[in-house]
Amino acid sequence: MNMPALHAQPAWFGTVMGTGATSTLLFIAYHQLEWQPLLWISIGLLWAATLLAFALWPKYFRRLSQRSALADEIADPAHGAMLATFPAGVLVLANAWGNAGQVSIPSNIALIIGGVLAVIGAVIALGYSALWASVISRVEVPLAKINGGWLIPVIMNLLVPLALLPLIAELPDQARMLIAVGFMFMGIGVLLFVAVFTLLIVRIATQGSLPGPLVPSLWIPLAPAGVFGIAIVRLFQEGAVVGLFSDELVVIAEVVALMAIGFGLWWAIFAAIDLHRARKVGGIPFHLGWWGMVFPVVALATSITLMDQIFEFPTLIAIVAVSVGFGVWSFVSVKTLAAVAAERKRAASRH
């Protein structure tokens, strides 16, 4: 598998996804554990994710001026799906501004920022997921080329309800409409996840383990396991507030979220075993696809922390979940900074 140079890789917005999601994880954990440093770090990560987004968006918009090269990149089964990290990152950032953002700047301004980002992210997510599916369906792709990254363009639709949640809570007059939109996007994300995940299972069952560079993508199924649980519980909770749903339906949603967590934990064990195998066989060269592990792990940790609040699990469970999520983000962040420094050093030596 040939990887583009680090600066040209399409998964750069995965850093925004992972950093923004970690901000939200720590913000939720702060309310659970009541440890002030969690709030400070959460706010710091929100601003770090925002600065990353400002720095990185030109990398994606420049592609629009090179239509032929962009079409080839979208059709590439190994890399095209990674372009979806851009709208996904925007949606994660929208949710983060609706959480930690409201305590770092005036809440009305934070909600406006989150709302604008939610609309932009939802429009691009809807358009790109359909475009990617259309392009990839016209390309004759060998089964062995399918990888976990194919899940990103479809499951990013699950992020739209999360991006809308802060607005639903603050705009009761618009809550019913926003909840309806959230469930529509959940339908897109869940049904398409089932379809693409089935392809991934068939690929693994018939073609064997993924090549080393693609092994990090095997962690991506943890993302819908976490995001779906958070979204369905919070949408039903907000729906109950405005009289759409009964408390009994909220309890059912919480049980369904627990089922999703169970799947996520099982898949994490499976992915960890394959990660260990790949490291022993030939190693996994660093590339930005490693961020495909960060957001899914953090999303699952966030869902576990939320369920911990609802079902009053032992506090140790939330501490472990938060520690694992933050630890994975820290590890991949350090690897990314080291890779950027190494590439700049190589570029300087050539000149």
Image (cartoon, helix red, strand yellow):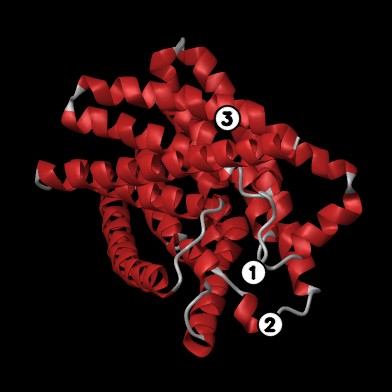
Rendered-image quadrant of the C terminus = top right
In the rendering, which numbered label is found on residue 1?
1
Q: CA distance from mark 1 to mark 3?
A: 27 Å
Which residue bears the numbered disc 2? 142
Q: Which residue is mark 3?
A: 52
The CA span between labels 2 and 1 is 14 Å
Pointer 3: residues within 10 angstroms few (<14), some, or many (20+)? some
How far across and down, in percent of the image, does residue 311 sit? 16, 48
Look at label 1 and name its amino acid. Met
Quarter occupied by residue 265 = bottom left
Q: Position of residue 165 (x, y in %)?
A: 46, 35
Whether residue 243 is visible to the viewer of this picture, yes or no, is no
Residue toward you, 71 or 198: 71
Picture coordinates of residue 241, whole percent (x, y) = 35, 35
Instruction: Bin the neighbour count of mark 2 within 10 Å (Cα to Cα): few under 14, some 14-19, many 20 and up.
Output: few
User: Which residue is found at the position 11% from the left and 44% from the top?
Assistant: 316
Q: How much space separates mark 2 and mark 3, taking CA atoms?
A: 35 Å
Q: Earlier in the sequence, mark 2 or mark 1?
A: 1
